[in-house]
Image (tube, grey):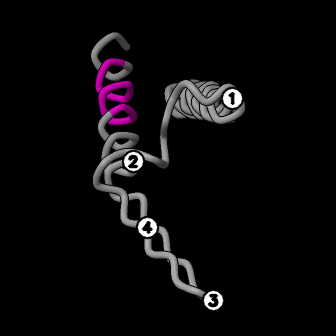
Amino acid sequence: MDTLAKTLIALGIVLIAAGLFLYLGGKVGFLGLGRLPGDIRVERDNFSFYFPITTSILISVVISAVLYLLSRFR
């Protein structure tokens, strides 16, 4: 049970750090997430559709790498 608690705490810290980074990065505008090549954006007169596929893949790769590193050094 002790290992589960430590894992959940570490995961919470990583998620908070990632959330703050994305929030502050969006305010500053240096990340460019959401406007990457490959993100699908369709805008019509009364309709807009946005699917950030490239951004989703990039975030998934980063999170997977962080979790992999956390599991290796635990």
Q: Earlier in the sequence, mark 1 or mark 2?
A: 1
Q: Secondary structure at mark 3?
A: loop
Q: Main secondary structure of the magenta part?
A: helix
Q: Hey, what amino acid is under mark 4?
A: Arg
The magenta-colored residue range is 62-69
For numbered disc 2, what is the local secondary structure?
A: helix
Identify residue for label 3: 46
* Residue depicted at 32% across the width and 51% down the height: 54
For residue 68: magenta? Answer: yes
Mark 4 and mark 2 residues within 8 Å of each other at the beta carbon = no
Q: Earlier in the sequence, mark 3 or mark 4?
A: 4
Horizontal and vertical percent position of residue 57: 31, 48
Q: Where does label 1 land, which residue?
A: 20
Res 5 visible: no
Residue 68, relative to residue 46: is it above or below?
Answer: above
Where does residue 56 sit, x and y in percent of width and height?
Answer: 39, 51
Which of the 4 image quarters holds residue 69?
A: top left
Left or right of 59, for residue 29: right
Q: Residue furthest bottom?
A: 46
For discs 1 and 2, the disc positioned in front in the rendered view = 2
Q: Which dot, 4 or 1, sits closer to the camera?
A: 4
Q: Amino acid at mark 1?
A: Leu
